[in-house]
Image (spheres, helix red, strand yellow):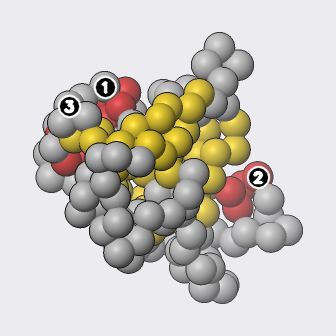
Amino acid sequence: MATVTAANPALIESSPAKPMAYQEAFVHTDATYSAGQFCKLVAGLVKEGTTGAASGVGADAIQLYALTAVSDAIGDSTTVHTFGVVHEDDLWEINEKTTTMARITIGVQYGMDVTSNVCTLLSTDTTHKVFVVRNPTWAERPYSDNSADTLARVTVKVLSTAIYTVGA
């Protein structure tokens, strides 16, 4: 068993029908986010993803993927930033926040935690669902990942209810 360092999600497979698209957008003035963090559009401006509030509604929105970081709330409405667009068929590798991967069930839907601009799967949250688990990485890569790892990695898809909602 090892403690893995949590990192923002990584796109590991993009749908052939919908390859990673890019969108240019202005950033909200109080937004801060890290490269790789999930983001959302709120009134046409990009804000960082947040820990869930209501399943598939506003605060749970996951629509964009930050390609670069914005720190110290330097976002503005005069500079355009480029983001990756999240699709429901994309596969993402993400760290699990609270338990080991042995307890994660394939096909179950879970929420997201955002702490210090790092997005993780929150397996204790089945109310604010934004991810569906596809596979724990220890099943795919037993030579480098272990089901007993703390902050272990898992492969997920983002639920369409999190993508096609109005960010809040």
Whichever of labels 3 and 2 marks the residue nearer the N terminus, that label is: 2
Please report contact status of discs 1 and 3: CB closer than 8 Å, yes or no.
no
- Residue 144 at x, y percent in the picture: 80, 70
**In which quarter of the view is residue 17 placed?**
top right
User: Under tag 3, what secondary structure?
Assistant: loop
Picture residue at 47% right of the left edge, 57% below the top: 37
Residue farthest to the right, as pictured: 143
- Residue 131 at x, y percent in the picture: 41, 44
121 lies above or below 146 = above
Name the residue tied to disc 3.
166
Q: Is residue 143 left or right of residue 101?
A: right
Picture residue at 62% right of the left edge, 79% below the top: 4
Label 2: how many Cα within 10 Å (few below 14, some 14–19, many 20+): few
Mark 1 → mark 3, Cα distance in angstroms = 7 Å
User: Under tag 1, what secondary structure?
Assistant: loop
62 lies above or below 15 = below
Mark 3 → mark 2, Cα distance in angstroms = 35 Å
Name the residue tied to disc 2.
140
| Residue type, mark 2 in image | Glu
Residue farthest to the top, as pictured: 17
18 lies above or below 4 = above
Mark 2 → mark 1, Cα distance in angstroms = 30 Å
Task: Choose between 167 and 7: the one closer to the eye.
Answer: 167
| Residue type, mark 3 in image | Val
Q: Is residue 138 left or right of residue 142?
A: left
Whichever of labels 2 and 1 marks the residue nearer the N terminus, that label is: 2
Task: Choose between 75 and 69: the one closer to the eye.
Answer: 75
Work out whether residue 130 can be spotted: no
Labelled disc at residue 164: 1
**In which quarter of the view is residue 2 placed?**
bottom right
- Residue 146 at x, y percent in the picture: 69, 71
Question: What quarter of the picture does the N terminus occupy?
Answer: bottom right
